Image (tube, rainbow, N blue to C red):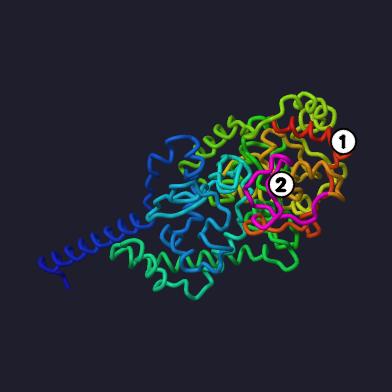
Amino acid sequence: MALDTEQKRKIKIILLLLFVFVGIGAFVGWYKFFREEPQPDWVTATPEMQFKYGSIGGENEAGIPYWIWYVLPRMFPEYLPGSGGYASLGIPWEQGQELPVGFTKKVIGFSRVGNNCAVCHTATYRRSLLETPNFVIAGPGHTIDVQGFFRFLTKSANDPRFNADNLLYEINSVTDLSWLDRLLYRFAIIPLTKKALVERGNQLEWMNRAGLPDWGHGRDDSLNLPKYFLAKIPEDGSFGVADFPSIWALNQYGGGKALSWDGSATSIRTFIVDSAVGVGARQSSHFEADMQWLADFLGKLPAPKYPFLINVQKVASGEVIFKAKCAGCHDGPHVATVIPIEEIRTDRNRLDTWTQQAADGTNRAVTVLGIKREGVIKTQGYKSPYLDGIWLRAPYLHNGSVPTMRDLLKPVGERPKLFYRGYDLYDPENMGFVSQGEPAMRVGSKIDVTQKGNGNQGHEYGTTLSSQDKDLLMEYLKTL
């Protein structure tokens, strides 16, 4: 039956209204979940601020809704190591800042919290108990307990109290969400966040295997992370814990020199890209610009100067000892090259964690992500790094198993078997951080060198020097 004019008019109106409603719904969906706003100007006011708080694109893939991130410590303090919220995890937090160093806030539909390189590569130190911590960007983040942060998120998400009613109650006590945002949080944002955190916790369950020590402050199992997440290699029981390294003055590692602890990355771009991918950054319209900015900034950033007095009369004599005992690996043709494990003889667990299969799988996975960079490789040893800023890079060796430089210059049998890492009070006499006593025990994590991955053997260079010559050598090292 043919439609009359009035019926056609009504159908047109209905279709038009449907089109309008669909359009409005699509716009609201885009606006509330996908629109991307630039960060405030203060974030990029200086290169230092941008490094500490600037987004590198991790909020979309691995970000947590800001208000959920904000209230979690209030809801689940029992899953943190102490009072003070996230600060109890040793995360560097500057006075007056909304977020800790290395945590970014960006609006992608709604405010999300992500991470950048500074979360693992910002060092802090104090010269006295009453001093406010000094922050050194691109330094080794020796105070942060990354594993503790992962565990906190996982335990919180698996707790039955992590639900819309409880979270919205806490959120509403600190901010006023609009009626639409309350609906979105209740029926979409909170359930999806819980699901994502539970799944991420399941993917990280391998780090909780019985019989393995905790990563501890300032360390992670940095090779198993890409091996399991990117290369999708089945869990193999390996354990390759290592310190977060300093990443200043990267240009000196150009020309194919070894960057990562085992030299698996020999390109500055690869070193930076893989670290960014590790915190959730993915190919985007600004990915290449972000990576180039980091390469330019970190390439020229100088190492920090030693903040205490130096005995200049000892430095010249110390330099002579350095050239005789250390320069062969750390200041000559062999610097930033891989020293075979049979020669260096340090703990080999991290070396054995990384396989050719893992390197090949990771290279394929990064290519699938649409990212171009030189591939990572498998090596048979550990690199001999440049020693600029070595005063701030304690604890020493790739796994941070020797607390001070003075201890590193001792034979293996005389090095500490138990100590605590994560305390930021500096010990200039021994060239490292205070690692014994109640304060270090309270805020740090115990390192037992008899446990897997924690071995403090090897690198016995300079151990036969006299006490006087060790003092001279250490005085020179403070100038680097």
The quarter of the image holding the N terminus is bottom left
- Span shown in magenta: 415-439
Look at the image and tell me whether residue 272 can be seen. yes
Where 126 falls versus 455 (above or below)?
above
Rendered location of residue 11, percent (x, y): 18, 66
Who is closer to the viewer here, 79 or 411?
A: 411
Q: How many marks?
A: 2
Please give left or right for residue 299 compared with residue 46 in the image.
right
Question: Which label sits on residue 403?
Answer: none
184 vs 300: above or below: below
Quadrant of the image containing the C terminus: top right
Give percent across and percent down for residue 450: 81, 59
Q: Indicate the position of residue 173 as horizontal and vertical percent values.
A: 35, 66
Mark 2 element type: loop
Residue type beneath disc 1: Leu
Q: List the residue tagged with mark 1.
A: 465
Callout 2, which amino acid?
Pro
Residue 13 forms part of the magenta stretch: no
- The residue at 56%/58% (across/down) is 88
Name the residue located 66 percent from the left edge and 31 percent from the top edge: 309
Residue 382: name its quadrant. top right
Q: Looking at the picture, tell me which residue is in the foreground, 401 or 409.
A: 409
**Quadrant of the rendered image containing residue 442:** bottom right
